[in-house]
Amino acid sequence: MQVNRDQFLEQGYVILRNVIPPALLDDVRAAYEKAVDRQRVLWTRERTGGDPPGGIWETAAQPRLHLSRNSLVDGENPLAVEIWLHENLHGVSSRLLDLQDAAVTEMMLMCSPVKDHGPAKWHRDFFPAYCAPLQAYADDILESGPRYVQWNIPLYDDSVLWVVPGSHIRRNTGAEDRQLIDNVRAPLDSAIQTHLSAGDGVAYILPLLHWGSNYSPKMRRTVHGGFSDFTHYPHLGYLPHLSSQAQDTFTRWHEHSQLRMLQAAAVLRAAIAQDGPGYRAALDEMHPGRGPKGQLQSTIFLSKAARRIRNLKRPDFDMLPDWEQNHATSMHPMTLQWGEPIAELFSDEEAEKLWAIFKPVDDAMQDTEPQWSPGFQGDKAPYYFVDVPAGLTVDSFIAGWDQKA
Ligand SMILES: O=C(O)CCC(=O)C(=O)O
Ligand SMILES: [Fe+2]
């Protein structure tokens, strides 16, 4: 399959025709419908109190399956997972990310709701307080390309998704901000609507401003997920049901994800040791070839990791605000967040030192006034949404240690 990486990098998305070859489409539909049937049984079982009989299936605007988390795939429908290994997904994602072997992150399916829910809100798929400001993403992408590619691959014709071309590497314009503040559920003048036929795909770069324009009962089964060099596999129940080649691929990805976590821990250890050259070398081992902006992006992510690891060690963890508790335990390897497994690699004392080292980065990323900006996930937070504080670099971070020593 031909793919124009330059266009992908410049526009922040690329539309590809017949990502699922027409000869496979019916079988992929059947494999996913089997997963839908299974998920609906689970949702019926999990319903509580005032829920309707179908539970989430009936209440959600976008009922969503997570193949990577639940037992939805077995010997009857291995294709639901195996399609992710097709050259048109795995190979193309590797080329778009400029990796030898991009690994699948999440494998999901977005379904139509039972009743009309209308348009969602325009957003960029991240909450800066948990990750980094928009500018840090943009600088990293411009320097070395994205760390993650997200896909929508509809199994039936689908025009729900709108995107703002080029918005992955820039802040909103004043006009966009005005439109979003006026009505965050209406078409933006700068946007285009994707029109995908069954089997087509759109691959997009995460900070892209995008919109689920209409959640109507019109039949929707859209494969959704992505690829990265930073992943994790919490549930491999489908593994024994896959072809031996597919099993090898997932086993390789699983081992790679564990290696990446250990390499991230090594970066944190170099920081604890206040070893500047060691910190840079460990960053390069964990994420080869990234430049100063990429290393800054990783450093911002790691400041969150340091905060989370230290929080997990606190005797008063249960007293922390809900957002701190949830943030500390959740998994998001793409932003170097490995939840409890990485915290277990550090002692209480190391966690304190780690936090002392990274706290200046965490402080620099915050204002005393609550921050907010249109078009992001999440609510008001003390952390900057868009700008990286002037003067915050990996050099300045490391120079701060020398002053401490
Ligand atoms: O429905 C879509 O195609 C977009 C979904 C989306 O943006 C989201 O759930 O974050
Ligand atoms: Fe989104």
Image (cartoon, helix red, strand yellow):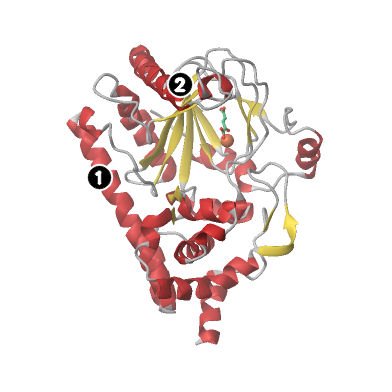
Residue at image x 49%, y 87%?
A: 405
Q: Is residue 91 left or right of residue 158?
A: left
The reply to whether residue 57 is in sight is: yes
Residue 64 % position (x, y) = 49, 27
Q: Which residue is mark 1?
A: 252
Q: Is residue 4 above or below residue 366?
A: above
Q: Which residue is mark 2?
A: 44
Residue furthest toward the front?
A: 49
How packed mark 2 is, by other alpha carbons closer than 10 Å (few <14, some 14-19, many 20 or more), is: some
The reply to whether residue 293 is in sight is: no
Looking at numbered disc 2 in the image, what kind of residue is underneath it? Thr
Residue furthest toward the left?
A: 244
- Indicate the quadrant where residue 73 lies: top left
Q: Quarter of the image for the N terminus: give it.
A: top left
Q: Which is more toward the observer, 72 or 294?
A: 72
Residue at image x 72%, y 50%?
A: 372
- Indicate the quadrant where residue 131 lies: bottom right
Residue at image x 48%, y 37%?
A: 150
Q: Is residue 197 left or right of residue 347?
A: right
Q: Is residue 396 above or below residue 329?
A: below
The answer as to whether callout 2 falls within 8 Å of ligand 1 is no
Query: Nearer the observer, disc 1 or disc 2?
Result: 2
Residue 84 % position (x, y) = 35, 30
Mark linked to residue 79:
none
Residue 95 % position (x, y) = 39, 40
Q: Calculate the distance from the C-alpha at mark 1 to the C-alpha at mark 2.
A: 35 Å
